[in-house]
Image (spheres, helix red, strand yellow):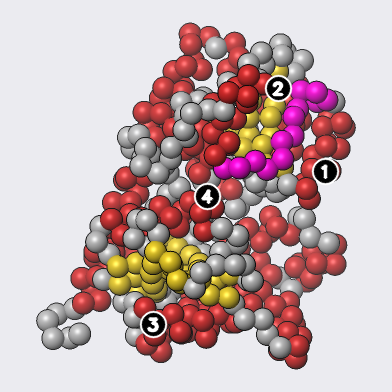
Amino acid sequence: MRIGMILDVGSDLADDLRVNKEASALCGAGFDVALLAGHHGSEHPPEETLDYGLKVSWRPVPAPALGRRLMLALSWMLRPWSYYRQWAGVIADFVERARPDVLHVHDLPIVPTALAVARDRGIAVVADLHENMPAAQVVCMRAWPIWHRARFHLTREYRRWRHMERTVLRQCARIIAVVPEGTRRIIDDYGVPADRVFVVSNTEDETTYDPGPPDADILGRYRDCWMATYVGGMGAHRGTDTAIRAAAIAGRRIERFKLVIVGVNPAAKGALSRLVGESGAGSDVELVDRVPRELLSSYIAASDACLVPHNDFEHTQTTVPHKLFHYMMTGKPVVVSSCAPLKRIVEATRSGLVFRANDPADLARCLVELHENKDGCAEAFGRNGREAALGPFAWCNDAATLVEMYRRLEAETRGPPGRR
């Protein structure tokens, strides 16, 4: 079976852990996988084949002419996903060259355009929902200018995203979400048959996550601290604000306490620095700029506790980040908020503590409890997490789900002898 993946590449394909893991699993299972990687002016070879067998077609997405740009801007205000109509010709050309039996579309915004191309050619579409996109728009809106937020509310953008999502997902042959909480909303809210919806999570295992030897300078820098670490992106849903406020409390009860937030982008640094000052956290918090990916695991290795402090949004109630499994793989105790997927996984694996989302005092309580380490709970949480990340929550299980989903889809699309 030939699988044609479609991805809007933000910067570097290597940064998309999920896409690489899925493509590698499918190539390893014998599927012929090609990826259309749309980019916006970066320098890439037109074609390349990655070491695990994925064939990548790098294609620039054409910028529209001035008149078209004005129409597109107006259309975008009413239908934000209309930007991806610019992809129609690129996807059609990819289909003609790669001749896929199915299009595997990474994330919701490209699905309407891919469906339109696939429908004319009788090709099945698989929608791989990296996140709950309608809910993600609500989170992103928090950082927008006031006029943009006003437009979001006046045009009922969230409802329009949900309507679009409902319409296109009902037309897809298969739908993939990252957690069961995500599949339930698709089945219950949209009436999609349960046998078309699958969970392929953001798990890791020894085949996909190799932390390598830790950086000695980073280990030495924090050797005398009791260190809680958050690594990853910024944003209203990430809970870094809750973590900073918790640090102001925990720092008064834990000797040599240090909260280290790694991956701070320039846009977020000012606001986070002000919050550090206003909360009274002071030197108990260290903000670290973005670092090369290979150094992230060193910060984790230097830690006594690792955080996923997600605030309570619809979005965070229906997703789980890779970082949770990175922490667990490294054998570190985790502290997570009570958002449903995080709470479910951590309680099931006994890999850490759960605090009430958006509650800095409760997060500080968990940090103090880990620091006290009664009956060796911190070490036990770390051991349990690693065992779970290599066992029931290992990537090999999700990879098997993905491969089996495609084997069944292949049997369906092939049909009885003589039909193809």
User: Where, by quadrant of the figure, is residue 384 drawn?
Assistant: top left
Looking at the rendered structure, the secondary structure element under dot 2 is strand
Question: Of the residues tagged 4 and 2, which is closer to the observer?
Answer: 2
Q: Earlier in the sequence, mark 3 or mark 4?
A: 3
Instruction: Give the quarter of the figure containing the N terminus.
Output: bottom left
Find disc 4 in the rendering and name its residue. Answer: 319
Find disc 2 in the rendering and name its residue. Answer: 258
The residue type indicated by label 3 comes to Arg
Q: Are marks 1 and 2 in contact (CB under 8 Å)?
A: no
The image's mark for residue 97 is 3
Question: Of the residues tagged 4 and 1, which is closer to the observer?
Answer: 1
Looking at the rendered structure, the number of numbered marks drawn on it comes to: 4
Q: In the rendered view, does 195 fall on the left or right side of 261? A: left
Q: Earlier in the sequence, mark 1 or mark 2?
A: 2
Please give the range of residues in magenta. Answer: 281-293
The residue type indicated by label 4 comes to Thr
Residue nearest the observer in this picture, 9 or 18: 9
Q: CA distance from mark 4 to mark 1?
A: 25 Å
Counting from the top left corner in percent of width and height, residue 351 is at: 46, 27
Residue at horizontal 76%, vertical 88%?
66
Question: Of the residues tagged 3 and 4, which is closer to the observer?
Answer: 3
Counting from the top left corner in percent of width and height, residue 360 is at: 71, 30
Q: Earlier in the sequence, mark 3 or mark 1?
A: 3
The residue type indicated by label 2 comes to Lys
Check the image and name the residue furthest to the left. 417
Counting from the top left corner in percent of width and height, residue 65 is at: 71, 88
Residue nearest the observer in this picture, 148 or 379: 379
Residue at horizontal 37%, vertical 56%?
51
The residue type indicated by label 1 comes to Ala
**In this rendering, is residue 323 above or below 37?**
above
Magenta stretch holds residue 321: no
Instruction: Give the quarter of the figure containing the C terminus.
Output: bottom left
